[in-house]
Image (spheres, coloured by chain):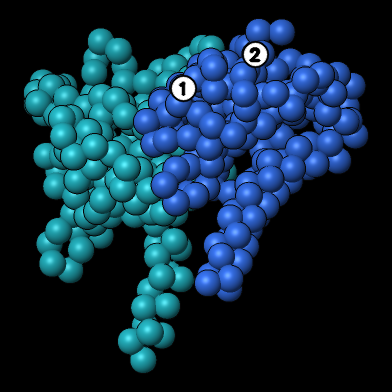
Chain colours: A blue, B cyan
């Protein structure tokens, strides 16, 4: 019985670790590539609670990282370089599902997915003119399909401020 | 032995159902485009979506349809003006879909918009549809769709408007072909 309980706990811990790993991997890749650190967000620890109250687009287990002043890096304006960075991330087990570039609005949105059993783990990296937001959420297939139809709209509804 | 064969098939499946190789000039179009969209839904992601789509309503038809697919890949580019991509580049792309492996079932040209739409089918050894490629070239917009897997041609219209696949009115395309070509 104890062995079975331990196995269940280990599987649950491994799943949680994988989800954190995906999010942290994307965040660290951006930090390393552009030589910046994510912006500290006060009270981010209550993010899950706030999300449960707000229920944006059927999501749970919310993670958010915000980057400012990315345009201080000369590489930041290079879209091909950004694609290479994001493609390298996808080589680590995340499925890249959709990429949208808007040169007119100086925005790029990348959505990655992993199938985590009864739900999907969705990572959104939304780049705007001078900064970026990375969002990790556990979500249902309806939200995933909506995100594919309107990636920028979904990024905005989850907190990525693309208008700045 | 069966296990090895299954393992080999599983390993080869992603290779067979990948993004279309684009001619070099088209590969670089996202640099020129005002807006570009790149959709990559491989077999694993489609099976995931199929698993969770409801069995009722319009979604049920899409669920049944995508269950047999190995991948949906879409590249779409919108340009600020005309002439940002060359007709020769698109012709080089079309050249990849020649008989006997591929058949062009729709070739439409609109005199009004100046756009071309081509749909190519690939059949497997049993005569079933094993892949569809759609190339829609408007003066300021280019969309390339690659659908890999088994599907009924009449189901294509169900995918139109989803996953950034253009809405397809095959009746309209057929009549356009008769009128314009």
Q: Which residue is mark 1?
A: A57
Can residue A160 be seen in this snapshot?
yes
- CA neighbours of label 1 inside 10 A, class few (<14), some (14 to 19), many (20+): some
x 74%, y 15%: residue:
A129
Q: Which residue is mark 2?
A: A162
x 48%, y 42%: residue:
A120
Q: Are marks 2 and 1 in contact (CB under 8 Å)?
A: no
Q: In screen coordinates, is B5 left or right of A139? A: left
Q: Is residue B174 above or below residue A25?
A: above
x 41%, y 54%: residue:
B44
Chain at numbered mark 2? A
Observer-nearest residue: B173 or B126? B126
Q: Position of residue A46 (x, y in %)?
A: 70, 23
x 58%, y 55%: residue:
A12
Observer-nearest residue: B131 or B89? B131
Chain at numbered mark 1? A
| Quadrant, the C terminus of chain A | top right
Residue that sits furthest to the top in the current view: A163
Secondary structure of the residue carrying tag 1 is helix
- CA neighbours of label 2 inside 10 A, class few (<14), some (14 to 19), many (20+): many
Q: Give the number of the disc on residue B67.
A: none
Q: Position of residue A43 (x, y in %)?
A: 77, 20
Observer-nearest residue: B117 or A144? A144
């Amino acid at each position: 019985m104890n062995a079975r309980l331990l196995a269940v706990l280990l599987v649950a811990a491994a799943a949680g670790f994988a989800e954190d790993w995906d999010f942290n991997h994307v965040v660290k890749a951006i930090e390393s590539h552009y030589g910046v650190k994510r912006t500290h967000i006060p009270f981010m620890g209550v993010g899950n609670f706030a999300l449960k109250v707000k229920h944006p687009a059927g999501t749970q287990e919310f993670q958010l990282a915000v980057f400012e002043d990315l345009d201080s890096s000369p590489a930041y304006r290079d879209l091909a370089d950004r694609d290479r960075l994001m493609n390298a991330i996808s080589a680590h087990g995340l499925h890249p599902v959709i990429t949208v570039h808007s040169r007119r609005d100086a925005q790029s949105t990348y959505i990655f997915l992993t199938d985590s059993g009864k739900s999907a783990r969705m990572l959104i990296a939304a780049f705007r003119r001078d900064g970026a937001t990375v969002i990790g959420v556990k979500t249902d297939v309806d939200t995933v399909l909506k995100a594919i139809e309107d990636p920028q709209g979904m990024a905005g509804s989850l907190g990525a401020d693309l208008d700045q | 032995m069966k296990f090895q064969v299954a393992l080999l098939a599983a390993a080869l499946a992603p290779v067979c159902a990948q993004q279309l190789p684009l001619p070099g000039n088209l590969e670089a179009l996202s640099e020129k485009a005002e807006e570009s969209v790149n959709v990559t839904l491989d077999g694993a992601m489609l099976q995931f979506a199929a698993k969770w789509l409801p069995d009722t309503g319009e979604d049920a038809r899409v669920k049944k349809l995508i269950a047999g697919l190995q991948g949906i890949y879409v590249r779409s580019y919108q340009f600020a003006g005309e002439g940002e991509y060359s007709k020769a580049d698109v012709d080089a792309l079309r050249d990849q879909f020649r008989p006997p492996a591929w058949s062009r079932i729709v070739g439409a040209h609109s005199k009004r918009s100046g756009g071309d739409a081509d749909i190519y089918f690939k059949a497997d050894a049993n005569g079933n549809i094993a892949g569809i490629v759609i190339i829609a070239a408007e003066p300021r917009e280019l969309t390339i769709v690659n659908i890999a897997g088994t599907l009924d041609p009449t189901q294509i219209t169900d995918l139109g408007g989803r996953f950034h696949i253009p809405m397809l009115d095959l009746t309209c395309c057929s009549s356009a072909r008769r009128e314009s070509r």
